[in-house]
Image (cartoon, rainbow, N blue to C red):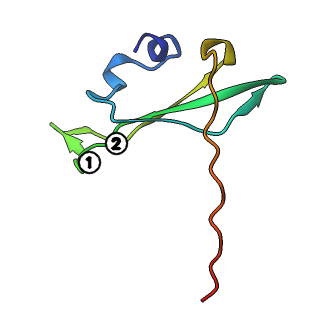
């Protein structure tokens, strides 16, 4: 919460529960490779709660390799096409 608040996202704009966490593709920012971390929630199919909008939210963080020593990203092989 503190990191999101420090980047201009108010606590009132944060969901009550976070339900998904996943690493995404690495990105390059100013020549430095960073890992992406996706944090998500879902709105439980409630578009509004108490008359207030309740959207699904995705937060994406750029994470330095130094903050994740020994991190190895998962390698997924492409699916093979099977002949009918």
Q: State yes or no: discs 2 and 1 in contact (Cβ < 8 Å).
A: yes
Upstream in the sequence, badge 2 or badge 1? Answer: 1
Bin the neighbour count of mark 2 within 10 Å (Cα to Cα): few under 14, some 14-19, many 20 and up. Answer: some
Residue 80 x/y as whole percent: 65, 69
Where the C terminus falls, by quadrant?
bottom right
Quarter of the image holding residue 11? top left
Vertical relation: 4 (above or below) 39: above
At x 35%, y 25%, the residue is 14
Vertical relation: 3 (above or below) 23: above
Left/right placement of residue 60 relative to residue 41 reads right
Residue annotated with mark 1: 47
Left/right placement of residue 6 relative to residue 62 reads left
Residue 55: image tag = 2
| Residue sitting nearer the eye, 34 or 79 | 79
Quarter of the image holding residue 16? top left
Residue 23: image tag = none
Residue 34 x/y as whole percent: 70, 25
């Amino acid at each position: 919460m503190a990191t999101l608040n420090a980047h201009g996202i108010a606590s009132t704009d944060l969901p009550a529960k976070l339900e998904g966490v996943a690493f995404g593709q690495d990105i390059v920012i100013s020549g430095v490779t960073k890992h992406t971390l996706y944090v998500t929630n879902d709105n439980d199919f409630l578009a509004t709660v108490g008359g207030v909008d309740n959207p699904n939210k995705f937060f994406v963080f750029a994470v330095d390799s130094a903050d994740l020593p020994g991190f190895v990203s998962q390698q997924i092989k492409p699916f093979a096409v099977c002949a009918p």
